[in-house]
Image: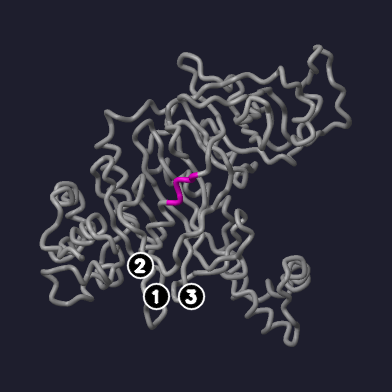
Amino acid sequence: MQLPLVAPAPLVSTHAAAFRDLCGNRRQFAHFEHYLTGLMVLENKSMANIARCLVESADKTNLSRFFSEADWDPAHVNTRRIRYLLDQTRAQRQPKRTSALVLDDTLCEHVGSLFEHVDRHYNHGEGTYPLAHNPVTSFYVSGAVRFPLDLRLYRRYEDITQWETFVTRHVPGRAIPRTKKERARLHKEVDPVLLQDPVFLALHAQFATKIDLGIALIEAAIRHKTPFGVLLFDGWYLSEEVVRVAERRHKAWISILKRNRNLETASFTLKDARGTAIALPGPHSAVKDLVPLIPPTAYRAVTVKEQTYWCFTLVVRIPGLGKVRLVISFQHADLSGSYVVLVTNQREWSAQRSGSSPPICCVGPPKPFTRTVRDIWAWTRTACAAPKPLRNIGVWCAWPTRSCTWPVSPRHWLTALSPSEPSGRCVASKPSLCSRNCCSIRMTVSSVASPSRTC
């Protein structure tokens, strides 16, 4: 049974007032409050259903036009939201040096191609190419205080440049292959020709890699004066460019190290169980070749909030990253099963938190925070007869943990808070959403993350 929305929820009325001056008039502000209320109390959270349940609305398209046509600036709303949340949580946040900014990307799957910029993106967890949006997100964690900050939509190079169209135009009759390797060879062959076209060159300049978008999110968080001292990101973003930005901004960073990454063997000494130095062949050695050489007695138990891990740590030099600390972590005492390798630029840190030392790195079940962002985007999947541009989609919701209102505005690729657990059922055309399953890892900075939740 659907509940009629006769008035904004008291929680919404209390906190939405901070955004009143950002709405052009009283009716726009009423749509803002009603949409927030609908997302909080209705099981079916689609825009069509929320509009259907509004008692005061004479025209059920008013809510849709509020997002697609009303003159409000999502950038201003997002800035106000971040400032409001930081002000409201000042007493609950941890010190800046132990607060973290988390970078990650996710897949927001859709059914049909009516959304602007929807495309086939690779899901490496399942080896599929679902139809989805692929936003890169930033998330703030400071003890019990945690909320999303922003997002940037990633678009594939071939999508943003309309590559196939230009290939057909400049190389008529040339078949465009479907396999990855053959397309890569064709890129090398025809791209120099395409770049002579001024229109294609302008589109080429608009392309941004996920690393570029991650750096933009770091700079945006700093512009918002978000107090954090640690950057957390997975191995996809572990690049010289991101590390350089972190160093310039005087931020500590923690990431996942891919097992095929080379270490400089002259930068460390590895000993066997008898204390004899192990000779390593060549100037470089991959991490996956190093782990089997570590004696089991070298691992130490690290207990993090009732969960015990077995870790080995050492300081090494990695080409392109410099001198860093590695933490190799197993979840089982017999060192069976998979392991994860974490890396940080804070060489004085250890795998075990002792006293007031900042970090702890550990392994945990996969449950990336961006799953909630995916769920929220899925709420916007409604049937329509004509293409819906991305800028015309807007989502507002509430963060019940801290009782603060927040917006998600995909129309300008600016997202805000997602709830720790989405309230209500996610409305989708598929029976379930695709989980990213990126890595069995949880990175904890002091008490930044709880054992039941992944950063």
Q: Residue at x 59, y 71 (%)?
A: 161
Disc nearest the viewer among 2 and 3 = 3
**What amino acid type should be assigned to the residue bearing mark 1?**
Lys
**What amino acid type should be assigned to the residue bearing mark 2?**
Ile
Q: Residue at x 49, y 32 (%)?
A: 230
Answer whether residue 95 is magenta in the image. Answer: no
* Main secondary structure type of the part rendered in magenta: loop
Measured from the top left, where is residue 449 in percent x and y?
Answer: 44, 33
Q: Is residue 400 visible?
A: yes
The vertical placement of 273 against 238, above or below, is: above
Q: Are marks 1 and 2 in contact (CB under 8 Å)?
A: yes
Q: State how far apart marks 2 and 3 are (Cα).
A: 14 Å
Measured from the top left, where is residue 422 in percent x and y?
Answer: 34, 51
- Which span of residues is magenta-colored? 367-371
**What amino acid type should be assigned to the residue bearing mark 3?**
Ser
Categorize mark 3 by other alpha carbons within 10 Å: few (<14), some (14-19), many (20+): some
Which is more N-terminal, label 3 or label 2? 3
Q: State how far apart marks 1 and 2 are (Cα).
A: 8 Å
What residue sits right under mark 1 in the picture?
388
Answer whether residue 368 is magenta in the image. Answer: yes
> With 141 as the anchor, is 244 left or right in this view?
right
Please identify the quarter of the rendering in which residue 160 is found: bottom right
Measured from the top left, where is residue 73 in percent x and y?
Answer: 30, 60
The vertical placement of 445 against 121, above or below, is: above
- Mark sitting on residue 393: 2
